[in-house]
Amino acid sequence: MRLGVLCSGGDAPGMNACLRSVVRAAASDGHDVIGIRRGYEGLMNADFFDSELGVGKMSPRSVSHILERGGTILNSSRCPAFATPEGLKVAADALDRAGVDALIPIGGDGTFRGAVALAEHWKGQIIGCPGTIDNDLLGTDATIGFSTAVATAVDCIDKLRDTAESHERLFLVEVMGRHSGHLALATALAASAEIACVPEEIVDAVAIAARVQELRSLGKQSIIIVVAEGDEQGGAVALNEKLSLADCPYATRTVILGHIQRGGSPTAEDRVLATRLGDFAVRSIVDGATGMMAGETCGHCCLVPLEDTFSTHRPLPEHQIELLDRMSC
Amino acid sequence: MRLGVLCSGGDAPGMNACLRSVVRAAASDGHDVIGIRRGYEGLMNADFFDSELGVGKMSPRSVSHILERGGTILNSSRCPAFATPEGLKVAADALDRAGVDALIPIGGDGTFRGAVALAEHWKGQIIGCPGTIDNDLLGTDATIGFSTAVATAVDCIDKLRDTAESHERLFLVEVMGRHSGHLALATALAASAEIACVPEEIVDAVAIAARVQELRSLGKQSIIIVVAEGDEQGGAVALNEKLSLADCPYATRTVILGHIQRGGSPTAEDRVLATRLGDFAVRSIVDGATGMMAGETCGHCCLVPLEDTFSTHRPLPEHQIELLDRMSC
Amino acid sequence: MRLGVLCSGGDAPGMNACLRSVVRAAASDGHDVIGIRRGYEGLMNADFFDSELGVGKMSPRSVSHILERGGTILNSSRCPAFATPEGLKVAADALDRAGVDALIPIGGDGTFRGAVALAEHWKGQIIGCPGTIDNDLLGTDATIGFSTAVATAVDCIDKLRDTAESHERLFLVEVMGRHSGHLALATALAASAEIACVPEEIVDAVAIAARVQELRSLGKQSIIIVVAEGDEQGGAVALNEKLSLADCPYATRTVILGHIQRGGSPTAEDRVLATRLGDFAVRSIVDGATGMMAGETCGHCCLVPLEDTFSTHRPLPEHQIELLDRMSC
Amino acid sequence: MRLGVLCSGGDAPGMNACLRSVVRAAASDGHDVIGIRRGYEGLMNADFFDSELGVGKMSPRSVSHILERGGTILNSSRCPAFATPEGLKVAADALDRAGVDALIPIGGDGTFRGAVALAEHWKGQIIGCPGTIDNDLLGTDATIGFSTAVATAVDCIDKLRDTAESHERLFLVEVMGRHSGHLALATALAASAEIACVPEEIVDAVAIAARVQELRSLGKQSIIIVVAEGDEQGGAVALNEKLSLADCPYATRTVILGHIQRGGSPTAEDRVLATRLGDFAVRSIVDGATGMMAGETCGHCCLVPLEDTFSTHRPLPEHQIELLDRMSC
């Protein structure tokens, strides 16, 4: 068989590890892999990766020493033109001309929406791998990149805690997550933040200010509030303004972590997850599956229909907001 | 209620995070916590932690800023004298005199064996928390400290790969694990090692040498072999000697990672796990449970009888040795 | 003798290492150390650190395991009220009442201005230690905290490079430095940034845009521009707006690193520097010196009058802007 | 001009950064660079690096994104055959046939001895760059790789301190350094080790044991002794045996850091130093210099005759052994 692989949407640490796994799993089973550069945009342009095996082919050697590197050697893109009937047809033709039997798109919900649309114009098999720092897909306990993004945010907040303590300040730290508070909540728990603001829970600024007063009375020298960018408070800067109108007992500072969370060498968890899922995607294709995402639940690899992965946002882990609250005493 | 907490056996990153969680979960529910220093040995000596709340009491403030620190502020020990009828009676008396209603020992299989023995001499409740880098306990998907130990080993091997590549060498890297290959296997997968030697699988040195020859012919500039200290080959140094007798096509070097794997700031995964399990242990005690370990399976907190956790060694994750093999091509 | 020590102004990694060194150098020579909390504000309020040696005393044990921690266990502050004749008199009286013979303030130019003013109202000896991430003081090759702040910024940009490459973008990264480009320039060189914008050099946005065009034509997939917050362009956000008016051949993103740069465990360089200077400050006091800063030049500890340290901004290292330019080809 | 560049001897973090600097400094000045693989051995075999510019040529793009990577993309080797009259002649011929006008060897004392010998058989210019983790060369305040090796060792000891404290143990940690204690001493100071054993100072095991007793009486929970592999005590394992014969008041453990110290992404200090020296080596060649090492002293680039760099071992920094002693109280 000839497999195509691409990365699409916001890049996530571990995409390279997943690529490597796809290439090596295929090679060890005797299949070819065509690397498609720059996501769906590159697919439309037949923009292929070259290696010593020849035009478009990814050899096992061409993915040496990428497991530990952030980003993606195939590059990624967001491509609105792809999601049109014309775009999809162009892409399907490109796949056919390259002799691709099956496609493995690595990305998040936008990538999988694109894959579902492509399936209506292309007869090959499609198995997606969940590569996104948001951890908002149903059908997998974790997405590739989430562990690393949490680790990066926690590392930053560990540093901020030092200066927050020194100056007895309150820091509002904005992490990524437009629709989902997974990253914010896990970061808050792991970084011993006192408060997390997530899109899934509505809390007004007055209640937050009251909680901060309470924490002050408990003797807290410093406070960290983790704010998901998509929180209804409007992000860290907006929340800071609201807090300043209330009677906040700490001097405050705001930090927006931004794209730092997308980079960096993946954690061991992301490396293992990416390796397992890339391999499982290849084996699923060989087994004839299509229209599915390769995920991991309860330690086992599993397939779930692509449509289901983005049908609703994955709910936050139960009880963890209450847990954060109990820990802030 | 009055809860006692102690750390016992080999220390693991995240023990402090677990301690903090126990203390704060108890405090937020109105219970006292007595910190017992130096594990079971300290228990026999009534060696208690002091805080501003008074002798023996751990206040929420006394566990500030320990979540991110390796080791344990309560200290740990191994104590053969405890596991005698006399020792257990001394310990039970010490708990009674201190007015302790329930005990939370944090540790591994040896710690839980001790807890089971203690339960025959003491009427209070006992809920254990799994703190060990070995990840060899049944009843929990991961133990506190495993994620960090893997991360540390992977970080070391990433560095070794640099010099292995520069000099085109083979490195044998020994990681901890006397009876269990969990740490070795996860490390090997995450560090893109070519080969893992674990106690659970018997492979002879000749087969390893043949595999190394094969990898050389694939064009590998360098090779990393991760060896669990308890592997039947006898560890990295012994395996190196055997390889040198075979016709190894690489110059070799040996590194024993040793106690480095026990230290360091815990990963986000270990911090969250430790926080969840410490909290769950306290709530389980309040609910009347005893003789159980607080574990996490499939994302949910759960209780499992202490005896079951060490009844057999937890098996290696299915298919991952084959996965490592497929990735080394 | 009885020495007082305090941290003032923006905190810097390594302040704790310097504190530890002051306390232990004094103890090993038989002198007492009074820890003054919250900088000059705490001095005015006679806000002293307690240890097991008694009120206000810092024992060698009280500084155990702080060398590796960011921030300062004495806390820091900025205190305009100190810099008034009344404030200085209050502070001088507090020092006299506490029996302090000599003061070691750890901080930057503002701290040393305060120390010079205090010297007019207080007869004790004063030796400053340079603790600031800005590296803008004359009389020392490096300030305590600079190495760590550069390391943190470089680590962040290494991560940003991953995502910049994946999406073929230009990132503008703002680092601290209101009046000084030391941090920006060292970060840019170490992080292989293509361009650095520093307060010491005037470059207009049109020239930067032209340079970016040129780099594009050389085949650069991504561009990193490091911008000192005090650059005349107005920081990263303002420069981004100007670039967007020119014809920038890359999609751009902006990241403001902010207070992350102030925290974190100090680098080995900062730990050694802080240890040397704290020790040297104590020995200089014993030798009778006053009104000086303890610095390090060409590997040797030296004293320089406090006034001289902030008389002009320390110039950027020669030729390094040209070096950055040569490296971006 | 046509410049040749190679890495030789034990690899050091920052060699890649130095390579990049040589290539880009040359390119920005219009010169060609030939990359010679595998050090002097590769030179004898005319084993050249290829890039898109053609056989043997290193283009500015071929050194993209290597500044931050440990090891060396040119590989390194130790080659006794080179240091023979025949070997030197073969190498000189290879350089002439490749049209190389000047050679930049990156390495340590062995590399520079080779360069001096080569100069007797080859008429081209030679400027060395100091790439070694040992920091034992005269003529430069620091060698490329030293800062990173110290950082790695300190990071490991920070982890070991966690477990040493938990179990109240003494750890003997062996670092590299056959003839030189620079790495051991800087590591000890930065990692707050209590004792350092270096080849430059003779201390017997009895005196060390007595010092350990004294430290115990001061209340130290744990002890770290950093041992240079070349210390006259025979390394960490041998010293441990001697201590166990004396009456050591702590349980002891031994860790040999080994090759981990050679790898890893270089620190900012090593990246800047390597960048400066690679550039300076190129400019020195253009200016006509030969037979010299490019070093940095007191912040300025400088040239020193190659013979002088290894004439004696660079002495340890003054007073730092006493400083370590004062800090351990």
Image (spheres, coloured by chain):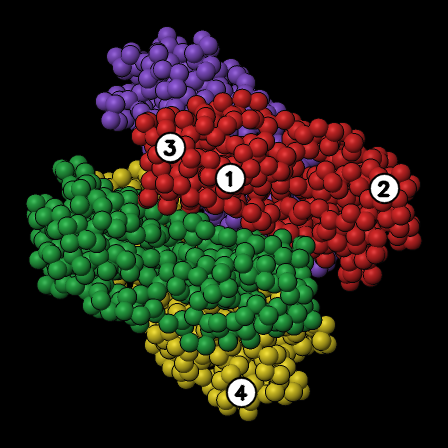
Chain colours: A yellow, B green, C purple, D red
Q: Position of residue B103 (x, y in %)?
A: 16, 54
Q: Position of residue D161 (x, y in %)?
A: 40, 41
Circle 1: element type? helix
Extreme-front residue of the structure: D245
Report the amino acid beneath label 4: Val
- Position of residue A50 relative to residue C236, above or below, is below
Distance, label 3 to label 2, CA atoms, is 54 Å
Return the residue at label 1: D238
Secondary element type, mark 2:
helix
Give the crowd class for mark 4: few <14, some 14-19, many >=20 residues within 10 Å: some
At a point 66% along the width and 57% down the height, the residue shown is: B251
- Whole-Å distance between the Cαs marked 2 and 1? 40 Å
Chain label for disc 1 = D
- Do the residues under discs 1 and 3 have CB atoms within 8 angstroms? no
Question: Is the N terminus of chain C in the top left, top right, bottom left or bottom right quadrant?
Answer: top left
Asked whether the beta carbons under mark 2 and mark 4 sit within 8 Å of each other, the answer is: no
Q: Chain of mark 3?
A: D
The residue that mark 4 highlights is A286
